[in-house]
Image (cartoon, coloured by chain):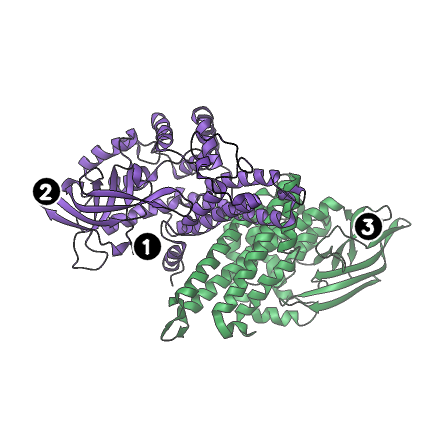
Chain colours: A purple, B green
Amino acid sequence: MDLAYTPEEEAFRAEVRTFLAEELPARLSDKVRGGRNLSKADIQEWQSILSRKGWLAPHWPAEYGGAGWSVTQKFIYEQESALAHTPPVIPFGLNMLAPVLIKYGSEEQKAHWLPRMLRGDDWWCQGYSEPGAGSDLASVRTVAVRDGDHYIVNGQKTWTTMGQHANMIFCLVRTDNSGSRQQGISFLLVDMTAPGVEVRPIITLDGDHEVNEIFFTDVRVPAENLLGEEGRGWTYAKYLLTYERTSMAGLGQSRAALGWLKQIAQKEKANGVPLARDPLFAARLARVEIALANLQTTTMRVVAAAAAGGAPGAESSMLKIRGTEIRQEISSLTRRAIGPYAQPFLPEALEDGHNEEPVGPDYAAPITPTYLNLRKLTIFGGSNEIQKNIITKAILDL
Amino acid sequence: MDFTLGEDRQALVDVLSRSLRERYSIARRRAAAKETPGHDRETWGQLAEIGAIGALFDEARGGFGGSPFDVVAVFETLGNALVGEPVLATLMAGSVLPTNVLEAVIAGETIPTIALYEPQSRYDWTDVQTRATTDGDGWRLNGAKAVVSFGEAADLLVVSARTEDGTFGLFVVPAKTEGVEIRGYATNDGQRAADIRLIDVAAPGDARIGGEQEAARAVALGTLAVCAESVGIMTWLKDTTLEYLRTRVQFGAPIGRNQALQHRMAEVLIEIEQSRSAVINAAAAFDGDTLARDTALAAAKYSIGTNATRVAEESIQLHGGIGMTAELELSHYAKRAIMIDHDLGDADHHLSRYIALTAAA
């Protein structure tokens, strides 16, 4: 056994580090580390830096403008990016839709949409969830009816992350009601600037506007925007979800967040000594640090298996469950670390241009909102209970 | 990155597990634990013959393995078959014995054990009240040792003692030496151990075979080994419990159809895979610097102590009433899984150790 990277992989890691050191603006990494709000422009700025480097869609095959990275290279890149506190790449187009397009889309669709993603022409969002559906995607009720060379779409999507910035949405829609729930679902690409599309914000418990409801009223969608075949949307959706889950352990993000927490635990004091030396807090910190080290190796085992040709299937559900639990625990400990200053609610302090005297420590304001926001981790992408159902079927064979 | 065992190691594991499957059983284990010497001599001979003992030591010392991953592979296999033989004692004591003595150990002719802990020391092996005083060219040993694994089976005892100037030393003493009083007993996990008194035990000058560093390494090796053993046990518990969930019918359906039980099993699976990763981390760090080694070991033993207990308790619970019976093999695996937390430091001990070590870093 050998946990070390090969010399080639180490060289790659050094290349990534150099790139991040030279190209990642400190203004952006400071915001990410501190948990302050990123604007649409911030995210686009980082995405265009990556695009110039050819690293915006590195996992795509080279023929479509990807870098053709191996599974291991992608893993290394994700870890290094998280540790450097880069802004997130918006995954919906690049990481989720693109693999489905590449596998199931027509040549015209690929030639049209993929270059636009690399140039940042479109901001995609995901139209999967519907009110009352939760993790039960097959219960989709948004209807698309064929009318000549168009579909007429009516219905409602929800929990649409960053939908307020998006101009395109990929949707699961029902085109047929006669068969089983999984049949009759189609996969449609919808222009959000078309008449009849309405976006309404959902304000989450942290006070932030990250998700939206989207209403479709007689929206006309050109038939060429149907991906693959009518009625096979469920197959495409499942394929997309495997891509969504492989990165959902958030290992890099947890490592970065734990590093930040440990710095805070040195600054904050309980009974006159740094919190890091308070026996109860130190024990909680050590427990989550050990759990994270174990998860890192588990993740590397899955990556190594995938690199050797195995497909990470239900194993990614294990990583999702434990990874999200750990990330939540770190955010929870960070909230506890700042004591009473976890209480002030100062959303203006998270925005650009805020230069008032901070209330409490200057790092305190984003901590409780981050903790509250991250409650989503064990719910989205198929709740952790759904992930356990997947493990039950696919690994435990029960 | 490479997480495969490698050909030679895999071959040893295959031979060892096949042999244990064919020749070993819980019944044999239980019979052995009822009386002295507390283990099954025939099984011991087979383990030596197959090379399970030799795999624990490197070539320079007469073995043919000795790497941390060799230790992991052997002990995971032993754990999976719930072998109740003094392999751990042999690994730890053997790591400090002189090479010429080790030869007979590897051949299966001599069984050694190591006695580091004392009635007052709890899990701190540096808390040593046993005294070694000089006596002419030799030594006189006086003191008491606690819960020595397979104390009755051992031909040789490696004991810790402090000399007159307070220096920590390891001394080797034949078990039959006058003044060595061994009080053997069964343990809760179906093996045997002993409390040992040393009353004016005479030892020659060359009986001192090591100091604190050697003891630390023996403890580290033993910790890695029991962690790996635990992964083997947990894997068996999971497999067996899954089989039960698939076959036991209640309310007209296999109980494994019940989502409440399915989710508990999914948790069990995750705990086991996390434990396996912890053991890999510890083995990978083993030959690096001591601080990194000890930190990874503390993390592993903490993880194992916490997870194995949970896996054992869940396995009993998921079996329902039958899980409470001594008749079921499962109860024996569960007991060993839980008792490993009392070998070489429990989860709380290793968590505080981890905190102390990372604070020093």
Q: Chain letter of disc 2?
A: A
Q: Residue A252, percent across and down? A: 46, 40
Kind of residue at badge 2: Asp
Which quarter of the figure has residue A191?
A: top left
Q: Residue B50, percent across and down? A: 57, 57
Could you classify mark 3 by the number of other residues whose Cα lies within 10 Å: few (under 14), some (14-19), or many (20 or more)?
A: many
Viewer-side residue, B199 vs A333:
A333
Viewer-side residue, A123 vs B359:
A123
- Residue under pointer 3: B162
- Residue under pointer 1: A134
The mark closer to the camera, 2 or 1, is: 1
Residue at screen point 68% across, 49% down = B218
Residue B6 showing in the rendered view = no
The mark closer to the camera, 3 or 2, is: 2
Q: Chain letter of disc 1?
A: A
- In this rendering, is residue B220 above or below A18? below
Distance from disc 1 to disc 3, alpha carbons, whole Å, reads 66 Å
Distance from disc 3 to disc 2, alpha carbons, whole Å, reads 91 Å
- Residue under pointer 2: A149
Which quarter of the figure has residue A107?
A: top left
Q: Chain letter of disc 3?
A: B
Q: Residue B179, percent across and down? A: 84, 62
SS type, badge 1: loop
Residue at screen point 75% across, 64% down = B195
Residue at screen point 28% across, 33% down = A117
The mark closer to the camera, 1 or 3, is: 1
Contact? badges 2 and 1 (CB < 8 Å): no
